[in-house]
Amino acid sequence: MHNQIAEFLNKTISGSNAVINLPVATVGDSSITVEAATILEVCKALKASSEFQFNVLQVITGTDYADRIELSYVLASFSKNLELILKAKLPRGDKFNLPKINSVVSVWSAANFQERETYDMIGVDFVGHPDLRRILCPYDWDGFPLRKDYIVQEKYLDMVVDPPEKNNTADQMFGKRLKEELGDPKRVSASWKDSSAGEETEAKDGE
Amino acid sequence: MTTHTEIINADMEDKIILGDQEVLKSDLLTLNMGPQHPATHGVLRVEIKTDSEIVVDAIPHIGYLHRCFEKHAENLDYRGVIPFVDRMDYLAAMSMEWGYALAVEKMLGTEVPKRAEYIRILVAELQRIASHLVFFGTYAIDIGAFTPFLYAFQDREEILRLFEELSGARMLYNYIWIGGVWNDISDDQLKRVETFCNKFEVELKKYHDLVGQNKIFIGRTANVGIISEAQAFDYGATGPVLRGSGVKWDLRKNRTYGMYDKFEFDIPVGTGEKGTVGDCWDRYHVRILEMFESVKIIRQALAGIEAGPVIGKVPKIIKVPAGEIYLRTECPRGELGYHLISDGGKTPYRLKVKSSCFTHVSILPEIAPGLMIADMVATIGSIDIVLGEVDR
């Protein structure tokens, strides 16, 4: 199926450069990488084609690699029962210069929330999105949490984020106390078992 | 669809031309429904612009329960992710776990023992009933009937008690593990499931007659919040919302997983029995019929279950080979997709969750304009969202 789709894309959209990525270790799914600049045309063509009919956009995943941001558009066809992972590679950019890609909201309305989430979490600017705001984080949050180099901001609206006195350390304290009081817990429980067994037999003997 | 900024600009102009006269324009009233609102089933805030009782625009604001589960997953080993997965859709934790376990098993090439497969189907379908019962109860409350809620929770309690015996927890189970399930189910428990099924089937019929055929209930839900087939596809709706719009699509049949291909059951769809196809009543009805189908599946699982081990061979330290997988399963609220990207290490490189509730929230601005405020409550209830899954 991937061969046909790649062929179809290369034939219909010039410059899409559709390449198939086979799974590395022969497990998992294959995907197709296309040129990021042509993503809108590619999506339009895939939806309109009578052969594939990708009528549903499932999800947009953004992944942060050391040298690039990779967007995965998972498309599905409910009429032909197909599934496709479509990939586009973008430069990482920085906080003031986010990587840009065309929005596909005009193709599937489902992309509206998915693109907002990708913008919020990974930091990709979707050109042509009707309402590109943060969606899960507060509107004035700083940084993009799912980037690998993300550092949690220390203060948000003058509130300290994750103050140490509010950390729940009950578990650690409990473990520490156990160790202090019982020494090696494993040894203690074993000896308890043995001694109680001894007591029981003694009691029986007494009877 | 009118966007956020356009509405604000429209508010600025206080005069409009009516005929040949310039008259004062009546303002739109902004109403915040939530985040603490009994009818939003959690912490969803919907900013509603109303013209008297009519909703002009609805803007959902989500994220109040955001814990960035995906970032957590990148720092946990593959087994450690499962308890976090539970906390997404806390009303259907078993189904959440199953999807994740399947994705990792497929990458590892692990074979799951037959008995474990049967137990998984058993608990997943029981979970579907429990989850739909919560919908049934709370939806009736949304509409204004309190009694059905008590009936629903009575039956749900029996399922939760069984799950508690199986896993030690009532809602967040950590029961389905990579390679099988944690604990075996006893014959006594299987017998209890059978007794429950026999009793529940009769009761459910009664509940449906009590609520679904009620004149007031039909009046409040039929022809309200209609999602057409085209809209459902456009917004990527799945599960009961898609089936309510008349599309016969169920992953358990169409892209089968587990052992569902050996089971016989129907896919109920909305038919517009009381109003239009895709209205609130249809979505309610689809869920009721699905519970009957779940009972059917459970009976077959009880008949087919065989003795054997419940967990397959899994390495002590799980290292998933480099690659990626997108796997979706049919959860009570719709399709749940896991996009797992691995670089060959002990932790996932990226784990993205496609949440059906998240998708369904995005339909609200499309179907809300033109509804009454009270119908808004009925519509939000009918798409049955769990905010833990929306915000992740």
Image (cartoon, rainbow, N blue to C red):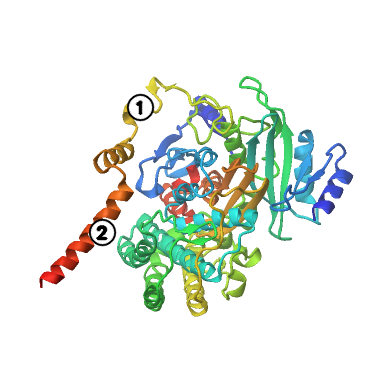
Mark 2: which secondary structure?
helix
Expressed as whole percent of the image width and height from the top left, the position of residue B177 reads 50, 57
Crowd class of label 1 (few under 14; some 14 to 19; many from 20; radius 10 Å): few
Q: Mark 1 lies on which chain?
A: A
Q: Residue at x 63, y 57 (%)?
A: B106
**In the image, is residue B150 above or below residue B206?**
above
Residue B30 can be seen in this image: yes
Q: Residue at x 73, y 41 (%)?
A: A87
**Identity of the amino acid at label 2?**
Asp
Residue B58 visible in the snapshot: no
Nearest the viewer among B113 and A59 is B113
Q: Name the one closer to the observer, B264 or B45.
A: B264
Residue placed most toward the observer, B300 or A54:
B300
How many numbered badges does the structure rendering display? 2
Kindly report the distance in space between the C-alpha atoms of the residues bearing marks 1 and 2.
Answer: 43 Å
Please tell me in which quadrant of the rendered image residue A53 appears: bottom right
Earlier in the chain: of badge 1 and badge 2, it is 1
- Point out which mark residue A164 bears: 1
Image quadrant containing the N terminus of chain B: top right
Disc 2 designates what residue?
A194
Give the residue type at disc 1.
Answer: Pro
